[in-house]
Image: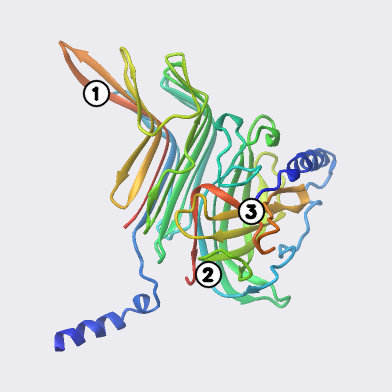
Amino acid sequence: MKIQFAGLALLLAMPGVVAGQMRMGASATSYGVSVRTANLNQTAASATLPGDGTLAQAQASNVTLGSYVSAQDVFAVATGDGDDPADAGSSVTLESVSVLNGLITADGVVAIASSSAEGSNGDGSSLANVTVNGVSLGDAVAPNTRVELPGVGYVVLNEQTTTPGGITVNMIHVVLQQSVLGVTRTTGEIVVGSASSSVN
Amino acid sequence: MSNPRLHAGLAATFAVALAAWGCEANQTSLAPATGRPEFHFFQFECTPFKVTGGGRIDYPPGTADQNPPASHEYETFGAHVIASGQTDANGTCLADKGELEWVDHRPEMEINGHPLNLHATAVTFAERATDTDCSDGAAHWGGKLRVQNTGQENLDFEVWDCDNGEPGAGHDGFAIRVPALGYEVMCPDPDLPPAEPSCTLTGGNRQFHPTH
């Protein structure tokens, strides 16, 4: 019984708990483009939720990372707060996207990730006029649509991955591959329009 | 929660406002200097609270349905505000701090080929709205902003925030008005309380925190 009272006293001694202000971990990050290869490792227009739970933003009128990717009008935002009810969210938008010299293009990219204690989702994410290998896929690209890129690797469009307490949305995720003596290995990746968030 | 009629008038008004900037010797002369609310909710409380989050609105019409992505008829934003619960000598509910980053992707709102980008430079007031049907909380707040595309700054703005449960998409709402520009993304609905002119989020979330 004494142990129970001690536990109750400890609980009452935590003002945040009594006032319903339990603090949770809220994290959110978004970025416009990222290239990870043997000769280039760079991310552009990146925003990460500050520790004090306010807002971070980044933007760029034009982004070009080598011959891998170019985009215009990139806006990235990360917001949220760990105070109960905790929330975290991020978004990034891009225009006139070209990957690998036009192998993949999109007029507009929107990635949104949203998390709360009730769950996470990528609602609001979209691709406008996306083409792959010169083939139009239109606007309605289902989550986790994979398209092979012969001689290059493959791309996953509207990639949505659950994470502990959250979600990561990568609107264009190119996996670069190389085959040597019948063995395929990954040599790098290109991500366009990434938003992630989590609450836990 | 839609009002398509606003669209044509908004574009015209905004174009006129932009043209006026070019003729103004003093580019801040269009903005009121107060940084106070343009009008109040019918009922509000000056209490401490916080609202966080961001997302996407597809305005017009501003309903829960997305417009075709290729139309670029949408807006994205991030915004947070911390209300102090204190009032100044004029009775204005003061904000401790806040931020707003707003991007209007509509082609008709582009400036020099780039999306309209509004950035808050100061958040000065914040009041909790009680005359709404937002289940988890609502707020009216604002301050001063800068048009990033042109450098025009010190412009009054006000926003309406609605946290109407989870998930935010399809439930929560947000609206903005910048009087000096004739710019507004608002979705008043005669079936809802006047304190709630917000447009429904098509992505993201608004989170009302009762205390901070």
User: Which residue is identified by label 1?
Assistant: A186
| B85 relative to B125, above or below | below
**A108 relative position to B115: left or right:** left
Point out residue A44 in the picture as x, y percentages from the top left corner. 44, 35
Give residue B60's quadrant in the image: top right
Report the quarter where the C terminus of chain A lies: bottom left
Q: Callout 1: residue from which chain?
A: A
Q: Position of residue A197 (x, y in %)?
A: 38, 49
Residue A188 or residue A91, whichever sits in front: A91
Tell me which residue sits at (31%, 53%) in the image: A165
Provide the residue designation for mark 3.
B175
Mark earlier in primary sequence (3, 2): 2
Q: How is the image coloured?
A: rainbow
Identify the subunit bearing mark 2: B
* Circle 1: element type: strand
Quadrant location of the N terminus of chain A in the rendered image: bottom left
- Residue B45 rendering spot, x and y as whole percentages: 62, 75
Q: Secondary structure at mark 3?
A: strand
Q: Can you identify the residue that label 2 sits on?
A: B49
Task: Specify the farthest residue to the top.
Answer: A181
